[in-house]
Image (cartoon, grey):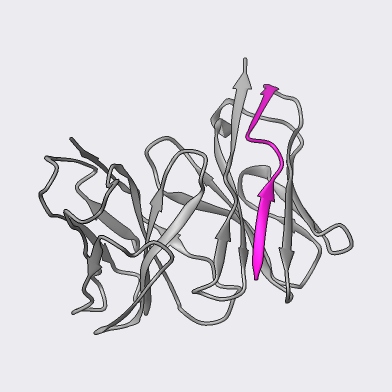
Amino acid sequence: AQSVTQLDSHVSVSEGTPVLLRCNYSSSYSPSLFWYVQHPNKGLQLLLKYTSAATLVKGINGFEAEFKKSETSFHLTKPSAHMSDAAEYFCVVSLGPRKLSFGAGTTVTVRA
Amino acid sequence: DGGITQSPKYLFRKEGQNVTLSCEQNLNHDAMYWYRQDPGQGLRLIYYSQIVNDFQKGDIAEGYSVSREKKESFPLTVTSAQKNPTAFYLCASGTGSGHNSPLHFGNGTRLTVT
């Protein structure tokens, strides 16, 4: 069994400041982990993925995430937030195509 | 450009009517999925299909039906038996192999039933 918990339902940051979105997971096996972004009334777009290679993963739009097995975490960060980063973000744990678990999502608001 | 097309973007229906949501992909992916998204609940799997003419129930299949007659198409029918059909529906596709292949999503259909 696996599950994923996004620790913040809403994060508000000022433009130009760092963004941190927290994700903890549990899994009986070594999963793959993904972060997706969803803009209003749109589908989900892949930001980055961890698949047991490097623990620090770089994604699109300046985002990166660090896999920490000891803490069962996969937090998403960006050094400097942009207005276009305002969206909902989902952390996903995968043990296979049929076995994906989605977090409840974190809504990011960026203040000018 | 390759991708997944869902139509329509918005759909309104009266209670008691069946409605079919379209999903087409040109990514040559074997696997296709339907998810339902409700506020604060993430995504929940309704049905999935690994190959043509085969599909399996997901976690919340009651009140829904699907078909997979072509590799490119995976329509979802929301029947009158679905007790709470108003939601945002997302179709996805993937290579269907391994656990490190991400899914590709369409832009969704927002269904409102009154």
A21 over A109 or under it: above or below: below
B99 over A34 or under it: above or below: below
The C terminus of chain A lies in quadrant: top right
Residue drawn at 45 percent across, 77 percent down: B95
Q: Position of residue B82 (x, y in %)?
A: 25, 54
Q: Nearer the viewer, residue B17 or B89?
A: B17
**A9 within the magenta span:** yes
B23 over A75 or under it: above or below: below
Q: Position of residue A33 (x, y in %)?
A: 66, 63
A80 over A26 or under it: above or below: above
Q: How many marks?
A: 0
**A86 within the magenta span:** no
| Residue B100 picture quarter | bottom right
- Is residue B98 found left or right of B45 in the rendered image? right
Bounds of the magenta segment: A1-14
Q: Is residue B29 visible?
A: no
Residue drawn at 23 percent across, 69 percent down: B66
| Residue A3 picture quarter | bottom right
Q: Nearer the viewer, residue A98 or A68?
A: A98
Residue drawn at 20 percent across, 78 percent down: B70
Magenta segment, prevailing SS (helix, strand or loop) = strand
Q: Position of residue B108 (x, y in %)?
A: 33, 48
- Is residue A37 found left or right of A57 in the rendered image? left
Q: Position of residue A66 (x, y in %)?
A: 79, 55
What is the residue that sits farthest to the right in this orientation? A70
The N terminus of chain A lies in quadrant: bottom right
Q: Is residue A103 visible?
A: yes
| Residue A17 picture quarter | top right
